[in-house]
Amino acid sequence: MTGSSFRLLRYFSITSFVAMIIVTPVLAMLYRYVALNDLVTLGERNNIALTQMFSNSLWSDFGPFLTSASGLSDDGLRAHPETIRLHRAVRELMKDLSVAKIKVYDLAGRTVFSTEAKQIGEDKSANAGFLAARSGKVANEITHRDTFSAFDRVIEDRDLISSYMPIRRGGLAGAVEAVFELYYDVTPLLGKIDRTQRIVVFAVILVLAALYSVLFFIVKRADRIIRTQYIELAAVNRELEKANEMQADFSAMIAHDLRSPLTNTLSTVTMMQDGLFGPINEEQWKWLAKIEANTQKLVDLVNDFLDFSKIEAGHIELVKEEVNLDQIVRDNLDNYLPLAKDKKVSVRSCVAPALSQIKADPRRLDQVFSNLISNAIKFTGEGGEIEVGAAKDDGTGVRIWVRDTGVGIPKQEIGSLFEKYRQTQSGKTSKQKGTGLGLVICKMIVEAHGGKIWVESEEGKGTTFTFTIPCN
């Protein structure tokens, strides 16, 4: 296969690998996020229960002392017998629990009790957790500490949930008397979360790898089928191209062989009309004129067929040069002026002066004008008008039109107008028959220049063919 062929297996493998790299850590992070949220929620509930237990068991005895300790100095508060007794009671109450530290703040933010005695007296009035709890809310935070003073020992490398909770007088509906801070050790729980996270990641990788393996074989087979079909299709296309070239060559040969004797016939008729073979009478002149007209029609038909065969086979070659558009329009109108006068049809040019020069193939442009103008004269009745004009097309090129006041084209026939061998109903009933290739040739020539062609028509009012030629 060529470098531009479809590489299904490669794209699938790359996409799957990228998807695994993205999906696995995302799922792991999502699991950890959910687990940590659940852990914080669980820790909050646990700490609220412990606070309630502290309030029920000890606050009634020690609350009055702690809320009225503002008159004591920090050293006096640390050495006070009630502080020492409260410390023993807290240790007894929190025995066998994963509580690392307890603090109590008065409403001014002063630390009136801590299981770490040196922290008694610290000012926490600006602490966000304290402020939240003083307003009646519960504030939680999960942190990691390399070292942490817990009761009478220092613990290392621990994960803790710190909770600030209000202590209320007379139950949940009572006023806040103090703020309780509790540090709960969740290191074992986080360890379980980490182990579970690793298991989840491993399981996800296994599942994705298994899914990839199954899909790999399916895609591999599909890729093999596509490659085979691609090769077969390429071979068929080559054969079709070869057949088209042979058909075009054969058509060109036949058309050329037909055109040569027809041209000779025309030349002979002209010489006879000129009297080179002796004088001719009026009856002979009439029949020679008929022979000339019919032979010319045959030459035109052969030329159309030959041009179409070359263009359809991709043999069209444009020789672009600076072209005087106004001159080309006038020359083509002059060529058809005798025919227009015979039908009493007026013709006029309407080319904007600024468009005198464009870059195009003059011979091919002549073909387009010749086809469109001859069609306009053919289908325009006596007293009708034909206009050939050109103007700038939004600065991107030139817009050229051939407008007539003829019979028009039925709406249902416009869509198939540029199909080969198709003729409108008016064309089928016309005295001047065609091949049905003229408009197809026009379309191919215009598109070869990079432009487009279209038609607007209304029965009984006329038709306008418009085409564009890009500036570059």
Image (spheres, grey):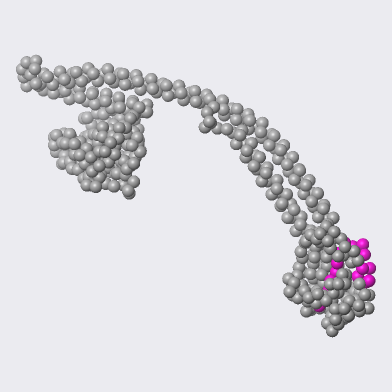
Q: Is residue 421 or residue 388 the one in the foreground?
A: 388
> Could one spot residue 358 in this view of the protein?
yes
Q: State whether residue 48 is above or below residue 10.
A: below
**Total marks drawn?**
0
Q: Is residue 380 or residue 113 the one in the foreground?
A: 113
Picture quadrant of residue 68:
bottom right
Q: State whether residue 64 is above or below residue 288.
A: below
Residue 50, position in %: x, y? 86, 67
Does the stretch in magenta take in 95? yes
The structure residue drawn at horizontal position 91% and vertical position 77%, both measured from the top left corner, is: 79
Residue 59 vs residue 44: left or right?
Answer: right
Which residue extends farthest top? Answer: 277
Residue 345 vs residue 249: left or right?
Answer: left
Q: State whether residue 427 is above or below residue 357.
A: above
Residue 290, position in %: x, y? 15, 23
Viewport quadrant of the N terminus = top right
Does the stretch in magenta take in 324? no
> Could one spot residue 405 in this view of the protein?
no
Picture quadrant of residue 71:
bottom right
Residue 427, position in %: x, y? 26, 33
Which stretch is magenta?
88-106
The structure residue drawn at horizontal position 88% and vertical position 62%, both measured from the top left corner, is: 154
The structure residue drawn at horizontal position 80% and vertical position 65%, both measured from the top left corner, is: 162
Viewport quadrant of the C terminus = top left
Residue 37, position in %: x, y? 75, 58
